[in-house]
Image: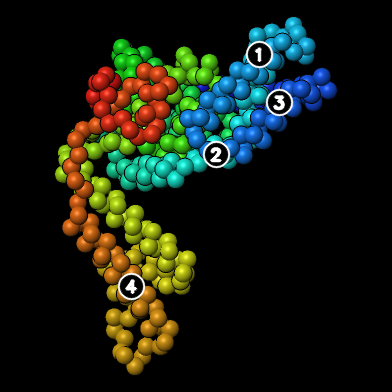
Amino acid sequence: MDTAASHSSSSSSSSSIMFYDFLDKMRNPASLNLVKSIKSFIVSFQFSSANPENDSERVQEFFSTMEAAIMEHPLWAGATDDEFDCSMEGLEKYIMTKLFSRTFAISPEDVRIDQEISEKIHLLQSFLRPEHLDIPPFLQNEASWLLAEKELQKINAFRAPREKLHCIMSCCRIINNLLLNASISENHVPGGADDFLPVLIYVTIKANPPQLHSNLKYIQLYRRQEKLVSESSYYFTNLVSAKSFIVQLNAKSLSMDEIEFEESMQAAKLDSEVSQVEALQAQMDPISSTRMHGMKKNIDGRSNYPYMEAEPGELTVEDVERLLSLYKDVVTKFSSLCRAVRHPSATRTKPSLPVPKGRDDILLQLEGTITNHPRGEGRGT
């Protein structure tokens, strides 16, 4: 756990060093032609029409072109493989930071999917427990999982694909280390993805990382492809699978009674709607909102209902305004409750947990088009 956290810190420092080393080389007069090529590409890209697939190909092709040019450039004569790789990482960060607003969450569809995932996770947070995902008790460590959640929540603090991917890897490494330690202490044979994926799904739900869909899509499209391999690819693919599982999640996906699941979801929706109403009311009428908050503290005490014993002639104009506000609030909540009772969620079939084989499979998952995958069903795939 500590090792993963320290690795996260050291990796962030090395990332900054790589970037500033790249900028220093670009300031050298000898790199003028490289600078011109980079600026020309950025300007051309920014003025072209957005098309994620085509944009990804253009960026990846430019990375390849620049890699060849840098490799042959005198400034990198005698450079080690690590030094050369650092320069390419710096190039990726520079390019994608400049193009971020043009490439990240640019379509209304992506925005919609992000919102739907975030809202669904918010509902699940209110009742989902580790046992619902068949996580055995000896592997449960919610206090330590907080570290993994915090790493995942950092993902929107960065613009470079490498740094976003690093947040995912830090999260997954923490989970993996905790599972290994728990397995050793319990003499349990590590179950690989069967142990890891359910925990990652749970951590993702607890973290509710911002714009999850768009971040995964952005990394897949714009991280240099030769770097999205090995450990990076494994952890990234697992988070894509976790996201797909959450999108398709229903009662049959969990070790949970179907009626209990539906009731829990409806209760969470109602609570969310009431919270939104109260938040809006607080913005529009802070005085009335404060009084309502006070009234809810003790529904058994008649002192919490200041108008119960009042006579019509005793009411002031201000009292009438407050009563009208309270009336509207009650009607809104009652209407929400009626909708929840009359229109329960339809039962859906159990979703498959797709395990993507490659870049195209992952992209299909990121677009939400895969509903069943030929490589199996369930969380343990």
Task: Name the element at disc 3.
Answer: helix
Please tell me which residue is depicted at 35% across the width and 78% down the height of the picture. 324
**Circle nearer the N terminus (4, 2):** 2
Q: Which residue is mark 4?
A: 328
> How far is mark 3 from mark 4, CA to CA?
62 Å
**Circle nearer the N terminus (3, 4):** 3
Does 331 sit left or right of 257 as displayed? Answer: right
Indicate which label's residue lies in the foreground, 2 or 3.
2
Q: Which residue is mark 1?
A: 68
**Circle nearer the N terminus (1, 2):** 2
> How far is mark 1 from mark 2, CA to CA?
27 Å
Quarter of the image where one finds residue 99: top right
Task: Check contact, mark 2 vs mark 3: CB within 8 A.
Answer: no
Answer yes or no: is residue 150 visible.
Answer: no
Amino acid found under the numbered disc labelled 3: Ser
Amino acid found under the numbered disc labelled 1: Ala
- Mark number displayed over residue 37: 3
Above or below, 261 relative to 308? above
Above or below, 123 relative to 178? below
Q: Which residue is mark 2?
A: 49
Task: Name the element at disc 1.
Answer: helix
Does 273 sit left or right of 287 as displayed? Answer: left
Indicate which label's residue lies in the foreground, 1 or 2.
2
Amino acid found under the numbered disc labelled 2: Ser
Task: Name the element at disc 4.
Answer: helix
Query: Residue 169 placed where, x, y %?
Result: 48, 24
Query: Residue 76 placed where, x, y %?
Result: 74, 12
**Circle nearer the N terminus (4, 1):** 1
Q: In the orientation shown, which residue stands out farthest toward the bottom?
A: 313
> How far is mark 2 from mark 3, CA to CA?
20 Å
